[in-house]
Amino acid sequence: MVGTARTCSYRPRALAAMTALLGGLLLVLGGGGAHAEDEPPAPGRPVVAVTTVDGVISPVVDDHLAASVEASAAAGHDALVVLLDTPGGLVSSMREIVKTFLDAPVPVIVYVSPTGADAGSAGTFITYAAHVAAMAPATTIGAATPVSLEGGEVDGKVVENAAAFAEAIAEARDRDVDFAIESVREGRSVTADTALELGAVDLIAASLEVLLREVDGREVEVGDTTIVLRTADAVIVEAEMTTTQRILQTLADPNLAFLFLSLGTLAILYEIASPGLGFGGVIGGVSLVLAMFSLSVLPVTFAGAALLVLAAAMFVAELFMPGIGVGAAGGAVALLLGGLLLFPGPSGIGVDWWVLAPTAGTMLGLSVVAGVLVARSRRPTSRAGADELIGTEVDVVLSPGGRPRARIGSTLWRLLPAGGQAPLHEGERVVIIDRQNIDLIVARDPASAHPTAAEESR
């Protein structure tokens, strides 16, 4: 779980602004989507809505779960099942989800699944808040100690407040209070079997079908009403995220954030190396905006962010001292270390090695290439005046478009035959007799060439 009362205050506002910007564009791609299918169930069969949360707990997840609870209640579903697998997320979003579940007008079942899944950090609170808490075999729950958005330790008051919040949820749902408190104060995490023994969860189920069969007939308190769950042989209705929500939630991924930062830096690097078209600047700007969105819902350490800024500066420095490779090498090392330290270890969020290593290597190679391009552009080019070029013999080469050209030094000049002479052919040896702007006037036999317009004007 990440975030504190102080550090979270500005993030939701920044996120809302970026979400509005990105969401407006993404709605064109996919439209709204439905939270629940309107397929009529078979007469007499119960209906259960099912949704999946398998990433960071973010404002996008908060909005989706709130809409799912509302839609399930409006449709008269017998229950809403949330398939949960999360390393944690923002405290502000977690608290909103907990409030939604505690006040839900429809029974909410949180099922930590599939096998190997984790209800880590914020996921612990969300699981505790459900009317029924279940786990698949070989899953884990706990490690709910708060971590600041900068990755450091939070004030003891914040930890105590989180522990009190966990205790209140446990008491409201009649679950083990001691584990709830220990998961916050000590960062305790346990397996599904231990969680069941402690009374932190209600049951272990090998599959969704088994879960629905096992909880059938269980009594739960929904508001002031006791409801007997009817879930056996239920019709399953998918409560999916909208297209926009799916895209935004996908962006809230540490690997994508790192890739967007690297791609944005690389694109701007090439824009600096070869300015003019602006494609690099556009791609770089879009990539960096997407990276900022990702990082707005993820915990970021100061050391990791500083190293990424240093990496960008070193890559740019390679453009001004090309050929040495020191800037590129330093930038690659800083990028690798920045990716390793960008997210705090206790959060359970991080960049995978299979993303870190190839990205750092690619940035190293391409920044060296950019430096070479800049070095070539700084070499003196042959821009001699007409008097210096006249009389020079050159070989005719044809461009891909078939136009005759000649290379003089590092410059490729366009060739025009002198008046009255036949078109030029590949491999011919000709003599420069004049220049018009960026075109060289050449002749096979200078003595027989007609005077050009430029010559007549002199």
Image: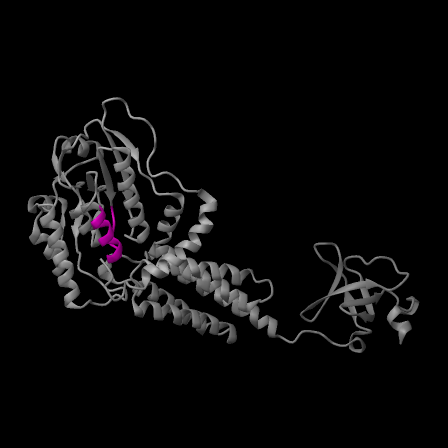
| Quarter containing the N terminus | bottom left
Residue 189, x across and y down, in percent: 14, 53
Q: What residue is drawn where x is 65% and y is 76%?
A: 380
Q: Which residue occupies the foreground of this view, 253 or 436?
A: 253
Mark count: 0
> Viewed as shown, does residue 17 lie left or right of 48?
right
Q: What residue is drawn where x is 36% and y is 58%?
A: 15
Residue 24 shows in the view = yes
The image quadrant that residue 173 belongs to is top left
Residue 352, x across and y down, in percent: 32, 56
The image quadrant that residue 307 belongs to is bottom left
| Quarter containing the C terminus | bottom right
Is residue 95 inside the magenta stretch? Answer: yes
Point out the stretch of residues depicted in magenta: 85-100
Residue 27, x across and y down, in percent: 45, 46
Colouring of the image = one colour
Residue 275, x across and y down, in percent: 58, 67
Spot the residue most to the top: 43
Q: Main secondary structure of the magenta part?
A: helix
Q: Is residue 80 above or below residue 371?
A: above
Q: Which residue occupies the foreground of this view, 146 or 402?
A: 146
The image quadrant that residue 356 belongs to is bottom left
Residue 362 shows in the view = no
> Viewed as shown, does residue 181 lie left or right of 301?
left
Q: Is residue 380 above or below residue 305?
A: below
Q: Is residue 255 above or below residue 318?
A: above
Q: What residue is drawn where x is 14% and y is 54%?
A: 166
Q: Which residue occupies the foreground of this view, 143 or 385?
A: 143
Is residue 192 inside the magenta stretch? Answer: no
Q: Which residue occupies the foreground of this view, 131 or 57?
A: 131
